[in-house]
Image: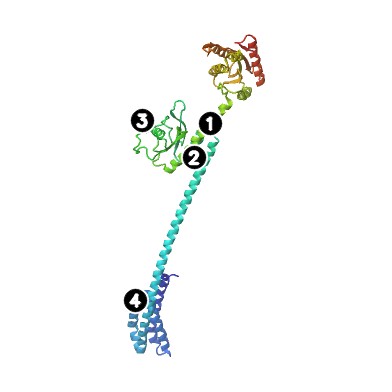
Amino acid sequence: MNPFVKRNLLIPAAFILFAGVLYGLIFLVPALKNSIQHLELIIISLLIMLSVAVMLFWVTMGAFGGLASFLLAMILIYRPLIALNPYYYNVLILAFILNSFYGNHFFRAMNKENQDHAVAMEKVREDTNLIQNHFEARTAEISAMENKVDSLLKLKSIADDLSLSFSTEEVVKVTSEKTFDKFQGDIRVSFFLVDEKTKELSIYNTVKTDKRKPVVMKKGGIFERWVIKNVQGLLIKDATKDYRFSMSGDETADDFISLISKPLVSEGNVIGVLRVDSPLEEAFTQHELRVLDIIGELAAVALKNAKLYKTTEELAIRDGLTGLYVHRYFMEYFEEEVKRGLHSGGTFAVIMLDIDDFKKFNDMYGHIAGDLMLKKVSRILESKASAGDIVCRYGGEEFAFISLNKTKKQAMRLAEEIKEEIEKSPISIRREMRGITVSVGISMFPEDAKLREDLLWEADRCLYKAKAEGKNRVCSK
């Protein structure tokens, strides 16, 4: 029990004891004077209790309480005690003096204890505040660490998904959607890419909430130009107040206030811009810009890898000299077209071409001249291919052409056009123009055959029929 509680309990006890003893000495003792023997024992007991009560006032209330109770007692019991015996009054005075001495001593001791207790409680409160502040700080650190871990896990998820993206379309889609999920809220993610041919920036993909408008500046605006020029990220807390930029025209019609933007850099060149904007002021901080910077770096690497993958894939399925598809890829595509035709009832033509007297020409003018002839024929074949058609270098100087959705009459006309175009396109060898002719064989699906090998055999048979009939001609079944 602390000193303050003790003191609060002693004060009412002192009042009760003081009042009870005074009542006994003033009223009860005179009334019992003639009826009780040895009354002096009762009087002495009451005087002792009165002394104790006065001492309690000294202890609890100090000099004021002690002296006030002492004087009040001396005044109120003076007459009753003198009437009984003057000796009692003198004894009481002596007792009060002693009690006052000890009471004052205890009062000082209790005050000191109170002060020590107050100091101790202040120290306890100070320590409690320190512990609470420390706890709150650690809680905030743990929360921040959890947020960082969550952020890193999301970035790892983005990195994992991008590592499985092997095309530009997949990289853009994954990056846009994951960025949207990462920042959340009423935001809009815009993915711009630089066209390799025109070198112009254009919007490639957008992910947004239903409330947001589509991107107005399809070719990018002043913010994208700034990012590309400075090759660094950009944070805009309020586009209407940023002194670095002055929006005009279509840019003022866009529904954003704040944005973060990151240039996508590969081998020192900006290949795109990743942008996140919001209709709210100060929606982003430097932390969000750092996160976008990491996502942008991952996306730039993924785009580079997708380009390398496409190049590698092209090298695997295209002939290094002519740029046409190789025999293996052609056969796989051919098989798929047969299955598709059987399922949907479609038609297509298989056109086989062979350069006439190529071996003789190669022996006379050399392999370099032969390569020029192969490239010339390849370019003409590619120019005649429609959407969905496929041209391949079947082997040596032989080529294969699958033309979709053709009747036999249309296939014959196409083959004749190819033959004539090649015949009208000589090549210059040693300052001489050397003409090129080809023999062509055609088979039709499903008219001539419904299996890949049978179609190839029929087209090849027609090709050799054209050779046998004098070359530079088109033959079919």
Amino acid found under the numbered disc labelled 3: Gly
Callout 2: SS? helix
Quarter of the picture containing the N terminus is: bottom left
In percent of width and height, residue 331 lies at 62, 23
Going from N to C along the chain, the mark reached first, 4 or 2, is 4
Callout 3: SS? helix
Q: Which mark is residue 181?
A: 2
Amino acid found under the numbered disc labelled 1: Leu
- Mark 2 nearby-residue class (10 Å; few <14, some 14–19, many ≥20): few
Residue at 44% x, 58% y: name it: 132
Residue at 46% x, 51% y: name it: 141
Location of residue 358 with respect to 300 vertically, above or below: above
In percent of width and height, residue 13 lies at 41, 75
Residue 49 seen from this side: yes
To which residue does mark 3 refer?
Answer: 249
Q: Which mark is residue 37?
A: none
Disc 3 and disc 1: Cα gap in Å?
39 Å
Q: Which mark is residue 308?
A: 1
In percent of width and height, residue 182 lies at 48, 41
Going from N to C along the chain, the mark reached first, 3 or 2, is 2
Residue 451 seen from this side: no
Check if mark 4's residue and mark 2's residue have beta carbons within 8 Å. Answer: no
Q: Nearer the viewer, residue 446 or 132?
A: 132
Name the image quarter holding residue 224: top left
Going from N to C along the chain, the mark reached first, 3 or 1, is 3
Disc 1 and disc 2: Cα gap in Å?
28 Å
Going from N to C along the chain, the mark reached first, 1 or 2, is 2
To which residue does mark 4 refer?
Answer: 63
Foreground disc of the pair 1, 4:
1
